[in-house]
Amino acid sequence: MRRKLWKKDNRKSNNGYTLVELIVSMALTAILATAVASIMFPVVSIFMDMQKLSRAQMVADTVTDALRKECASAYVNSVADVKVLNIPDAANHTSGDNVLVDSLNTAGIKTDAPGNALVFRINEGYAKALYWNTYISVEDYEEVRNNDSAEGAKMGLVTSRAVYRLISYAKKDSYTEETMPAETRPGYLHCGYYSTRTVPVPVTNEKKVDNFQLDKAYDYTNPFTVNAYNGFTVRIEFSKPAYQAVVAGSLLPEDLRPAYVVATIYVYQGSFEEQTGTDKLVYSREAVLCFAEDNKRVTE
């Protein structure tokens, strides 16, 4: 019986890729990579833009909530208890008490140009200013400190105010605008507290309304830390103050109280100094800031 013996062929193949095949495959790979990149780049760019827009919206919402909360605590009985003012920009700012100039007209109502600061009573003796475009400066700090020392000496007390935590007294002599703490710089929402004095303002029918004028700086603070801004800064415009009649059917200034103002919040990428050009503006929104009716005068 004959057996067929199979021999295993252990010879290795000498077949391979030619240079032409390598060049063609590399060209096809390059074309495919280019096509994928051309599709992916816009998608990634849109994703990054949407993420930035979402963060800017959160900043605007946070600022809006803070503004509404501050206005809800206003003590508003008279037409003159809320003021929309314009204060100089950071370059011209020296002291908050000096630049917050009363711009009410003779009737006690300001309804014309928008302003960058909102000032309102918080009780009979004090008012609050909301603004974004000035430094809380060393001069402001010194003014608060001097007023605080005078009051403390009378009462035998030493008080702690928010501005002391914003600016280090030990470093105050070495501060410049560039080295001021971030919490005190323009582009962030600031609150200024001022003692006031009441000044009657003549209006129609030989009547007067109790206007207030800022007297002394009491304190400066901000509603939340700079970290809440996520690398953005803000610009705020106050406008369109609306008034409510406290005497049915009367539109006389002495019979009106502020009901609300409109705030337009602009959110910019980067610092206050970089707020130039439309490319830096990421998001904007309007918000109605209402003044609580709990303090309004009731007239039967």
Image (spheres, rainbow, N blue to C red):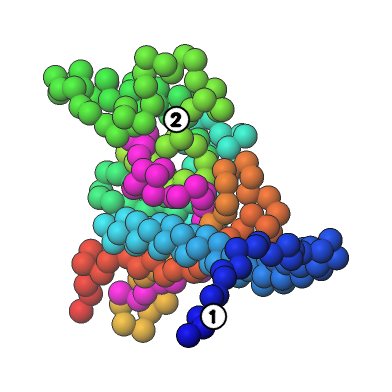
Question: What range is drawn magenta here?
Answer: 217-246
Q: In this view, does 133 lie above or below 59?
A: above
Residue 37 among those drawn in magenta = no
Residue 287 visible from this viewpoint: yes
**Res 282 → quadrant:** bottom right
Judged left or right of residue 149, residue 155 is: left
Judged left or right of residue 36, residue 264 is: left
For label 2, the SS is loop
Q: Which amino acid does label 1 sit on?
A: Lys
Mark 2 vs 1, N-terminal side: 1
Task: Measure the C-alpha gap from mark 2 to mark 1.
Answer: 95 Å
Q: Mark 1 highlights which residue? A: 4
For label 1, the SS is loop
Task: Report x, y in % for residue 133.
Answer: 54, 44
Dot 2 alpha-carbon crowd within 10 angstroms: few under 14, some 14 to 19, many 20 or more:
some
Q: Residue at x 28, y 25 (%)?
A: 148
Q: Mark 2 highlights which residue? A: 181
